[in-house]
Amino acid sequence: MASAFKRFLKQSTEYGKIAFRNQLSHAKQPSSPPKKIAYLIPPMPLLASTIYRHYTKGPPAASWSLTFHVLIALMRDIMKRSSKGTVENLQRLTRNYVTPLPFSISRSETTLPNDYRERAGDILKNLLTEDDNRRIGWDWSTDRTRVSELQGEWLTFSQSFFDTDTSFDASRQPTILYLHGGAYYIGCYSLARQWLSRLIKLSNARCFSVNYRLAPQHPFPAALEDALAAYLYLVDPPASAKHAPVDPKNIIITGESAGGGLTVSLLLAIRDSGLIPPRAAMPLSPWVDLTHSLPSITSNIATDYLPPVGFKHIDSPALNYSLLPPLKDEHAKDKSKPEQACNKETEHDPTKDRSDGLERVQFYAGNDALKLPLVSPIFDKKNLHGLPPMLIQVGKAERLRDESICAALKATNMYPGAPSSSDIPTKIDLELYVDQPHVFQILLPTKIAVKAIEHLAAYVRDVFQKSPTELQQSPRLTIHEIAATGKSRDTTEKLMRKMTSDTWKDWIGRLDHPNLKDRMRRVETAYERILEQLKKENEP
């Protein structure tokens, strides 16, 4: 038996080695799109090649187990294969997925009247200039009239199982507003039920989620309008709602990836419109820079599963941006002005970058709009000041790592050479998780993922136990590094020493770079370099 197993292991290792080389050599070869979803099923050679590399070359990150290494390889492969299908197909797969709930968690579905979208839209109209709307490139204000009403869901810990106290007041309970991730074009709140259930159990909170409209059929600012509508629905519900009005000071907003970026965008909209802000926020791996400007976008390609150069799919009606309601031309309606010939230089095509002709990079927004602060909050003109306290969790090995670090330093006004500001800096607790990829908290229940959710729950309890005065007296910025074992250490001073003036100047220079095509070329070059390095490592 032992000798047979050894022969099998040897054969599998050789097979895996060959398969891994083949994957590298054919990584960029195009293939024709299949008609069914079989393209999402990963090939067996991938498993064998990953096992071979894990035991001969080691995992990409030192603490990764074989199981975790295989999972990341599978996710990377599935994302690559999904590009051979349509956007609509992947949306159906992720929106129709149903996650079971623990017996102690109750769920209740609700529908938000369209009035809340209208109220949210009126607020956003006042925050966006005429130039902003030209950059957005479509008449988003009419989109809400051509879609179904916004769907939401309550998750509550079933107190009745364990507590007979009928005097419990849910309106004073911490309320978590959750915004799901998925690059703004896939996903739904039901995918997060498991980890949200654990969070509300540990924090004695309840959770409200919405399935906001998805790009590319409903690009920016549709998702933000829905997120703001959800916030307004919580604090000022209709008489028919299943909940009493929630005091904003009892709300904490959270979300992962695009949902984390949407969380920060929502905070900006609340701040700039003068609404009462929530008590705090907890963005997980927030996507706050849709221009892919900072170093970790390229340096961490090998330790993350996000696609190297953005999300791509074969052509389908979803990618036909001409189907969007066209932007109204106010000048054309003004009959008092003389007619002018069509000027190609001022025509706005939302699928192209106005300056360099680059094809649309993100489904969520056209290239001209990527630097709008409500799209990429890292470009907020107030440097993210004046926001509620935030706990930001991010993996040290993920590609969006530097976005969280940059946002934390800007928000707290703690970056090198920061001038004094009349705006109140935002208090940030930044947690960097060693060797962890994008949104590791929801991938596998590893020790460090469990620890991260426990930290989220502890943060909820902490901010609700402290008075506003106590929160103001806490340190402006704290940075903790959490090892794979779960051990945490304060690394605030270490990171501040590492962030020199030259490094910060380089980061800001990257963000200020006007040519999006150069950024994308830089990412592609880094990807090619990593592929070449892997080929050399696996040569006999």
Image (spheres, rainbow, N blue to C red):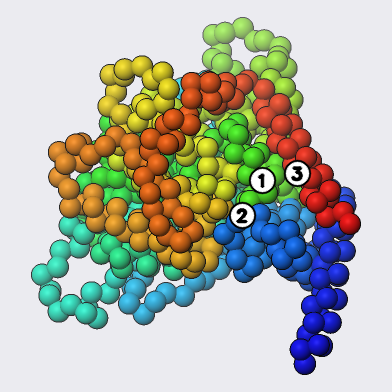
For the residues labelled 3 and 2, the Cα–Cα distance comes to 15 Å
Circle 1 sits on which residue?
301
**Label 2 vs 1, first from the N-terminus:** 2
Pinpoint residue 435: horizontal percent, then vertical percent.
Answer: 55, 53
Pinpoint residue 448: horizontal percent, then vertical percent.
Answer: 46, 61
**Label 1 vs 3, first from the N-terminus:** 1
Q: Amino acid at mark 3?
A: Ile
Q: Is residue 444 left or right of residue 173?
A: right
Q: Is residue 23 left or right of residue 378?
A: right
Which residue occupies the foreground of this view, 343 or 415? Answer: 415
Q: Residues within 10 Å of mark 2 (few under 14, many from 20)?
A: some
> Where is 424 relative to 148, above or below?
above
Residue 530: numbered disc = 3
Please say if the residues under marks 1 and 3 sit with CB atoms less than 8 Å apart: yes
Mark yes or no: residue 240 visible: no
Circle 2 sits on which residue?
61
> Where is 247 relative to 69, above or below?
above
For the residues labelled 1 and 3, the Cα–Cα distance comes to 8 Å
Pinpoint residue 400: horizontal percent, then vertical percent.
Answer: 55, 42
In which quadrant of the rendered view does residue 151 lie? bottom left
Give the residue furthest to the left.
Answer: 167
Pinpoint residue 91: horizontal percent, then vertical percent.
Answer: 62, 58
Q: Residue at x 71, y 31 (%)?
A: 522
